Image (cartoon, rainbow, N blue to C red):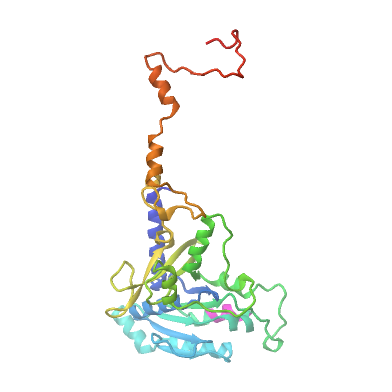
Amino acid sequence: MAPSAQAHKRAHSLLLFEKLLNLRDSASPLTLILDSLEQGARPLTEEFMRRAKNERAKIIFVSFATIKKPDAADVFIRARGRSLKALAAEITSHNTPSRATTATSTTTKNPPQKTLILLDTLNPLASQTPHLLPAFFTTIIPNPSTSLVAVYHTDVPTLSPSPSSLSSPPSEYAPHPLMLLTHLATTVFRVSSLRHAVAARRARERSLLEPEWGLREGREGVLVGLREQQDVAALEGGALGEGKGMEDVVVDMEMRRRSGRAVAERFVLTSVGMGQGRGVRGEGAGAVGVMVMVMADHPAFSRRAGGGGEEKGEGDLMEATFDLGLTEKQRRDREGVVLPYFDAQVEVGGGEGGRILYEMGREDDFDEEEDEI
């Protein structure tokens, strides 16, 4: 692909990602975020709420596992232990605008207020009533101005629903809840750690087996969460962060358009200070914002500009148990070596063209008929 086409594709993907984060033009009514033990969805959900607050949208936070109400949330609903019908009724009551608000919007011709519904986890609903999820989503998203962002933990096993909670026995041909959710969602975000992506890329460059983390490691012991950002910055030498705010997150986007065509791209969310880059979002002076960039443009993944004409530095050489470079003395000695064909060109350079100069050895058998020159 030509460089101009690549730049155009990256710019288009970045604008589409910003459009999804800002809840513009009802780009995605149902957004599904898939996280794991190695990287949670909290940085991405906080960015959704921060931008919704900037857009003056109403934020309804539905909690299955969150204890404390987030500061950006306008409505906090505790959903643990409640029936799906009662939960849908309460969410709809907070989402339905009043008649006075509707009349004012109609008179002034202003667009209706946006609403962001955020579910901190879908695993309880996927385990108890997976067959009712399509109707539940249809009920709580009554109009195009409402967007639903839901989180699903891929490392949490899905339990089979109890027979008492089902009106009919479950079908053995029913799809897995995760497959059902990815089919219903208009946009799917998969989050992962940037440190893990960098380690996997370094292993691929050296033709090594990519490392595994979390449950895929197959180790016995206790699961330990990600360390604090200060420890990460100390270990990485500040290459992946400045020791402030959240850790850098890789987001794999898969957005389905109305035509059915899917748009896929990988992005990096980086925490930076206010005014340090394009795409920064924050609140107040000195706040820590988030910068969004395409993964290929990140310093840890972008290639050196200028092509193969540039010499690689000492840090770009392949790591080995011995030195692959040359000292200054070795480089001077190599440049001072005179190769044999230089002498041949000087001796026979009188316009006779190239000739083969060969000195007979003791073991050579000279044949006058075949070896005449």
Nearest the viewer among 50 and 291 is: 291
Question: Residue at image x 66%, y 72%?
Answer: 175
Residue 353's place in the image compared with 14, above or below, is above
The answer to whether residue 299 is left or right of residue 167 is: left
Residue 72 quadrant: bottom left
Q: Is residue 148 left or right of residue 52?
A: right
Instruction: Point out residue 74 in the picture as x, y percentages from the top left corner.
Output: 40, 88
On the image, the x and y values in percent for residue 28 come to: 46, 71
Could one spot residue 45 in this view of the protein? yes
Asked whether, in this view, residue 131 is left or right of residue 356, the answer is right
| Start-end of magenta stretch | 131-137
Q: Can I make out residue 144 in this image?
A: no
Q: Left or right: where does residue 285 sit relative to residue 313?
A: left
Q: In percent of the image, x 32 and y 66: which residue is there? A: 278
| Residue 133 included in the magenta stretch of the image | yes
> Image quarter for residue 224?
bottom right
Q: Is residue 238 or residue 38 the one in the foreground?
A: 238
